[in-house]
């Protein structure tokens, strides 16, 4: 790959006018995003040795332990059929995130490739966030919440 994933990543976010900060000593950028349905933290991570780029949207709310099984069902239903990215939940602490990633070994990351990973990511978090909250706090079943979102 020409140049590093990290350098290309930093250049993309600068050129695209994102406000970010690098985590000290790590190839990770932290930023926030506000959508129509909420705000959350985002992390962009370069794995230069593996020639990979990963982008995460991370919900601020941790899923309470008694709701984790229901949210696991919700994200499994949401993930079914998704082409770019997926939801993940850490069962140990209730963190929910949306992940998009690419392996560019032997190639070069372009602005279009970054856009095609970053923007679908934040759109999916924004689209499904109300459903996650309805399951946690609004008494909706995972199936009802997905039906409201996907129709």
Image: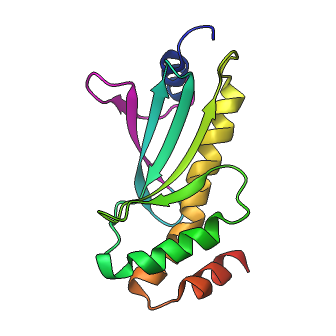
Q: Quadrant location of residue 133?
A: bottom left
Whether residue 5 is in magenta: the answer is no
Tell which of 31 and 82 is nearer to you.
Answer: 82
In this rendering, the answer to whether 11 lies above or below 68 is: above
**Residue at 63% over, 79% down:** 146
In this rendering, the answer to whether 143 lies above or below 30 is: below
**Residue at 59% over, 55% down:** 86
Q: Quadrant location of residue 63?
A: bottom left
In the shown orientation, is residue 3 left or right of residue 39? right
Give the x, y percent position of residue 55. 51, 40
In the shown orientation, is residue 110 left or right of residue 16? right
Q: Quadrant of the N terminus?
A: top right
Whether residue 33 is in magenta: the answer is yes
Tell which of 1 and 37 is nearer to you.
Answer: 1
Give the residue furthest to the top: 2
**Residue at 65% over, 36% down:** 115
Tell which of 75 and 115 is nearer to you.
Answer: 75
* Magenta segment: 15-34
**Residue at 47% over, 75% down:** 71
Give the x, y percent position of residue 134. 47, 82
Give the x, y percent position of residue 60. 35, 60
Q: Quadrant location of residue 36?
A: bottom right
């Amino acid at each position: 790959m020409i140049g590093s994933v990290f350098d290309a990543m930093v250049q993309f976010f600068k050129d695209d006018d994102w406000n970010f900060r690098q985590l000290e000593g790590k190839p990770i950028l932290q930023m926030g995003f506000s959508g129509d349905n909420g705000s959350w933290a985002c992390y962009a991570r370069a794995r230069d040795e593996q020639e990979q780029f990963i982008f995460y949207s991370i919900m601020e709310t941790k899923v309470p332990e008694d709701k984790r099984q229901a949210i696991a069902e919700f994200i499994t239903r949401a993930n079914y059929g998704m082409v770019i990215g997926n939801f993940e939940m850490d069962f140990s602490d209730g963190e929910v995130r949306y992940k998009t990633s690419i392996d560019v070994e032997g190639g070069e990351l372009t602005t279009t490739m970054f856009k095609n990973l970053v923007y679908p990511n934040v759109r999916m978090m924004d689209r499904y966030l109300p459903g996650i909250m309805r399951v946690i706090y609004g008494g909706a079943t995972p199936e009802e919440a997905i039906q409201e979102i996907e129709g």
